[in-house]
Image: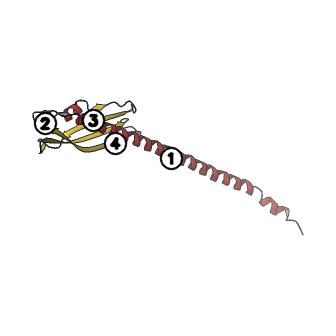
Amino acid sequence: MKPFPKAFNNKQRGFTLVMAIFILVVLALLGSYMVRISGVQHITTSDALQNARAYQAAKAGINWAVAIISKDTDNIQGRAKGCEAVNTKALLALAALPEFKVTVNCNLSGYLPFIEDNNKIYVYVITALSEFGSYSSADYVSKKIEVSIYNKVSF
């Protein structure tokens, strides 16, 4: 068998270098894609955690308002004073979640209570809004919860 002519061998030089550079470029692009995906997953996990904290902060505000209203057994001129007690301290500071600002608002469902047997029944609509960060920032999170409850006041 005869070896390839020398002129043919000269034309093949450098092809391995082109393939190696191509493979390095492809691997670099793949690596940068993986880093970007990892960053997105980290941000998504962080946002999910902040959303869960915001929900729990709003729920704590609702529970606080329910506790205040459940103690309301008196009334002033036919109106329950539970909402007034909640609305006077509408902004809560939670020790467990100090970064969150929780705003609680309470309204009576109607102007007059419902009369049932010897009880006045007041229906309350409580709204809690928890916020983290400022509205224009990238890490802003807010959750709003609204519940309706009733309280019986004997007369």
Q: Are marks 3 and 2 in contact (CB under 8 Å)?
A: no
Disc 4 to disc 1, C-alpha distance: 22 Å
Q: Measuring 36% from the left and 31% from the top, which residue is drawn there?
A: 94
Q: What type is the residue that disc 3 sits on?
A: Ala
Query: What residue did someone put label 4 on?
Result: 143
Disc 3 to disc 2, C-alpha distance: 18 Å
Query: What residue did someone put label 2 on?
Result: 79
Work out which residue is located at the far left of the displayed protein and give it.
77
Left or right of 46 in this view: 27: right
Pair 1/2: label in front? 2
Query: What residue did someone put label 3 on?
Result: 67
Q: Measuring 40% from the left and 42% from the top, which residue is drawn there?
A: 52
Mark seen at residue 41: 1
Q: What type is the residue that disc 4 sits on?
A: Lys
x, y percentage for residue 80? 16, 36
Q: State which tag comes first along the sequence, 3 or 1.
A: 1
Query: Tag 1, which secondary structure?
Result: helix
Q: State which tag comes first along the sequence, 3 or 2.
A: 3
